[in-house]
Amino acid sequence: MSYVKWFVLMSLLIGVGWYSQREKPLDVTWQHPSIGNVETIVTNTRSGTIKSCQRAQMSFPIGGQIDQIYVREGDLVKRGDSLMSLWRQDRIAKVNETNAIIQARSQHQQSICITAENDQKTVARNKRLLKQKLTSQEALDNAIAKADASAAACLSAKSEVDVAKALSQTAKANLDQATLYAPFDGMVAEITGELGEYTTPSPTGIAMPPAIDILTHDCHYVTAPIDEVDAGQLSVGMAVSITIDAFEEHTFNGTIRRISPYVQDYAKQARTVDVDVEFYRDSQKREQLLLTGYSTDIAITVARVENVIRLPSEFIIDEGYVYVLNEYNVIQKKAVELGLRNWKYSEIKQGLSRIDKVITSLAVQGLSEGKLARTAEAQRESSQVE
C-alpha cells in the first residue's frame, strides 16, 4: 500500500513538473479581413501652404513722400480703387498745363482750318470768273496756292493738337505713377508707411517691403511639394483630400489644377515637384474662413478599388505574408498577394478569405509559426475558471 502512495505521489510530482515546464500559449489578438475600398494615395513631402488666388505686393515705381492713404488694413476694395498716393502737385500741374495746351492748339487749329475752308471757296469762285473772262489766270493761280498753303497749315495745326494730346497722356501716366490702384477686388492685408514718410522703389537686388499688400480673402488654393518619384503618377483633375492644422476636425476636398513643369532642387532636401490644388465648390463657405499662409497636407488619390478584401497594412509583414490562427489555435504563416495599398489598408488579392483569423498583436515576444496561441477571450475564460 505504501508503494502505491509513493507511486501516486511521484506521478503527481512528475505531472506538476511537466505542466510547469511546458511551453505556454502566446497571448495574441486577431481579426478577420474586411470588405471595403482601398486607394493608392500620394502625399506631400513637406507641409503645403494655403495661397490666395490673387495677391499683389505693390510698390511705387518712383520715390516720394506719402501724401494720402485712402484705405486701412482689412478694408475690402474694388478693382481700380485708389489705395495710396505720393505728393504729386507738380505732376497734377503738368497735366493741367498739357490740357491747356490742347485747348489753345485746338482753337488755333479751328482758326486756321476756317481760313483754309474759305480759301477753297475763293478758288472755286475764281474758276467761275475765269470762265466768264472776268479774272486772270494769275489771280486763279494765286488763289490756288493760298488755298493749298492754308490746307497744309490746317493739317499742321491738327498734328500739333495730336502732339499736345500725346504730351497730356504722358503727363497723366506720370501722375498715375504717384498713385497705387487696386488691381483686383480684394482685401488690404498690410500697409507699410505712414503719412509724410518718404518711400523709394526697391533697388536691384535689394528687397524692400511693399507699400500695399492686397489679396483675395475668399478665394484660395493649395500648393504643396510632391516627391519626384511620385510625380509621374499624377495628372490634372485627380481628387485630393486636404487637411489643415487649424481645422483638424474638417477635411476639405479639391482637385489638382496644375503640376509644375520642372523639379525643385533645394540643397539638403529631396527633389520635389510643386502641385497646385483648387478647392471644390462645396468648400466655398468654409474657404472664406481660411487665411493665406496656413500649413496644410494633401492626399492625392491616384487609384481606387471598391468592395475588395482588405486588411490594415500594419498587420502585413514584409509586404508578403501574415500570421493566422488555424482551427487548433496554432500560428501559421500565410503568403498573400497584395493589390492597391496605402498606409492604412492593403487590398488582398490572394491568400486570405473573410473567415481567416489574422494575428494583429505582432509585437508579442516569441511570435512565430507553429507556436500555440490563445486569444484574449480564451485567456479571460481561463482566469475565470481558475
Image (cartoon, grey):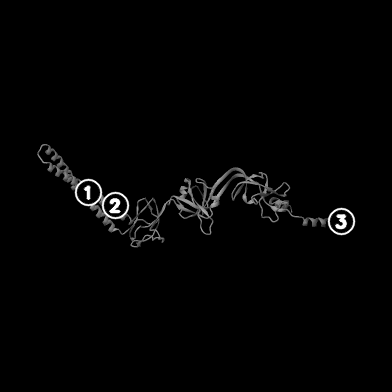
User: Can you name the residue that lies furthest to the left here?
Assistant: 134
Q: Quadrant of the N terminus?
A: bottom right
Pointers 1 and 3 in contact (CB under 8 A)? no
Badge 1, how many Cα within 10 Å: few under 14, some, many 20+? some
Q: Position of residue 321 (x, y in %)?
A: 67, 49
Residue holding disc 1: 156
Disc 3: which residue: 7
Q: What is the three-letter code of the residue carrying label 2?
A: Gln
Under mark 1, the amino acid is Ser
Q: Position of residue 375 (x, y in %)?
A: 69, 51
Q: Amino acid at mark 3?
A: Phe
In the image, taking residue 298 as reference, residue 33 lies left or right, namely right
Relative image position of residue 378 (x, y in whole percent): 71, 50
- Name the foreground residue: 257 vs 161: 161
Mark drawn on residue 169: 2
Q: Decide which of tag 1 and tag 2 comes sooner along the chain.
A: 1
Q: Mark 2 Cα within 10 Å, few/some/many (few <14, many 20+)?
A: some
User: Which one is closest to the eye, mark 2 or mark 3?
Assistant: 2
| Label 2, label 3: how far apart the Cα atoms are | 124 Å
Q: Is residue 11 above or below residue 143?
A: below
227 relative to 309, above or below: below
Q: What percent of the width, then of the height, locates residue 210?
A: 39, 58
Label 1 to label 2: alpha-carbon separation: 20 Å
Left or right placement of residue 3 versus residue 232 in this view: right
Labelled disc at residue 257? none
